[in-house]
Amino acid sequence: MLAKTFGAAVYGVNASIITIEVVVAQGLHFHLVGLPDSAVKESEQRVEASLKFFGYRMPRQKVVVNLAPADIRKEGSAYDLPIGLCVLQASEQITTTRSLEDYVIMGELALDGTLRPIKGVLPIAIEARKQGYKGFVLPTENAQEAAIVNNLDVIGVKTMQDAVEFFEGKKDIEPLTSDTRDLFMSQINAYEVDFSHVQGQENIKRAMEIAAAGGHNVIMIGPPGAGKTMLAKRLPSILPPLTLQEALETTKIHSVAGKLGARANLIATRPYRAPHHTISDAALVGGGSFPQPGEISLAHNGVLFLDELPEFKRSALEVMRQPLEDRKVSISRAKWAVEFPASFMLIASMNPCPCGYYNHPEKECVCGPGVVQKYLAKISGPLLDRIDLHVEVTPVSFDQMTANRPAEPSEVIRERVIKARERQTIRFADQPGIYSNAMMPSQMVKEVCIISDAGRALLRTAMERLGLSARAYDRILKVSRTIADLAGSEEIKIEHLAEAIQYRSLDRENWAG
């Protein structure tokens, strides 16, 4: 007898439906076909143990399990539950009143038949609804995540026996529902940190506001303890709120990576990722034998913070250059390729030298001759070229630190950022793929960032006297356009240019001289 149901395989951030067929015939042995990996092949032992635990048996006949399409590689242990149910139906140990073919079924079995959570539930649920399946049967711990998708019966089960009784009609399990939109709206700006907690550092806050308003990448240079990490953590709180579509994209990526947890719901706040400098290339940009999203994809629609940038491996930073430009990362293998989105703001921080006190107002740098230049040279020109704002962070004085003056909260700053972004949305309405000033290509900079003769003279003087490199030219114009947007100005004024010029510290030829 043939039994049939459906599962799914996740590739990149999308799922493909997999047909699971089981036939029990004359002969011996258990055969699992359809390009399974080792974890899928081992399902025979887990399924057999689970069946015995609940008083069923693995047929002592020829059992053939086919995972179709057979030319797509299947990986992981999430096919245990559908294989087990199909074996029971094909061997006529159960008679179902609900058809297995109406549902997508996924779950890993423990040896006692309980179900363990799986990864990639959200994209599977989206695909199941798209393909018109009645419901999705999965472990209870993943049910909340799948319930994000409406118009799909999400059936959470704790054990294999619960699933059997559900399909036999002996047990009614109420489909889990979630008021996703209301929950999303209630948590949309629920950040744990706020700029109102930061005393002093007004110039750095201003730079962060400009970065948020134009989507610019930032590097902060300053001594240890000056507040670089503290300020970076607060940047997501002044970015415009996630849209429902952005939240869904972000949640899908975290679902595929298995980062959502048991009480998962739609991610309502912009992600903030801060990997350690010992991170490998694959962990940063994604990859592996069966590609998983890396930190740059987990930071999609949010912020990626790289603390102590020169300490990161050169190779890890260099592979990040193309995703910074394309806002996506493609991982290719011999037989297939997957693509992960990676549209994030890069915030980097670094000490000015190995000892950390070069240019410090009070402490003396103890680094030898040429050490500072060598330290700065760890960051390549092409990577620096993709960072618009270079901000020098100075330590906060005791008076500023102990002042009781209320600082401006993130909510007030965010309102200004949203207004500036609205101007950019109108400006780039007919430019697909461009949403902020930071994304403008060089040709568009010339069309959009028009400056007066006086502004041109100021820029020429600044480049000559400060020794700014050629790469600084476009960056200064982009940043000055964002400053003008924050000020509500249609044209770029002299004061906007002057402020933008000061954010190019590392481009000055004499900065570490």
Image: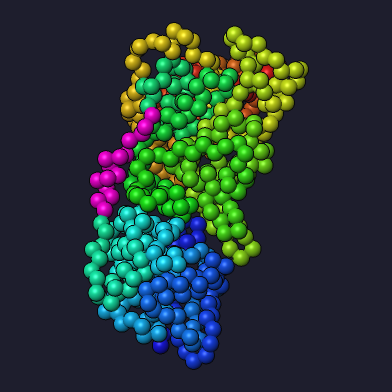
Q: Residue at x 38, y 22 (%)?
A: 197
x and y, in percent, of residue 270 in the image: 40, 39
The residue shown at (37%, 32%) is 192
Q: Residue at x 52, y 51 (%)?
A: 293
Provide residue 290's location: percent of width, then percent of height.
57, 59
- Depicted 356 relative to depicted 424: above or below: above
- Indicate left or right for 430 with 339 as reference: left
Left or right, residue 214 beside residue 462: left
Q: Is residue 325 left or right of residue 269?
A: right
- Report if residue 183 lies within the magenta region: yes
Locate the N terminus by quadrant: bottom left
Quadrant of residue 391 in the image? top right
Q: Which span of residues is magenta-colored?
A: 178-193
Q: Horizontal and vertical percent for residue 212?
A: 43, 31
Residue 437 can be seen, yes or no: no
Which quadrant of the view contains residue 491? Answer: top left
Q: Nearer the viewer, residue 171 or 507?
A: 171
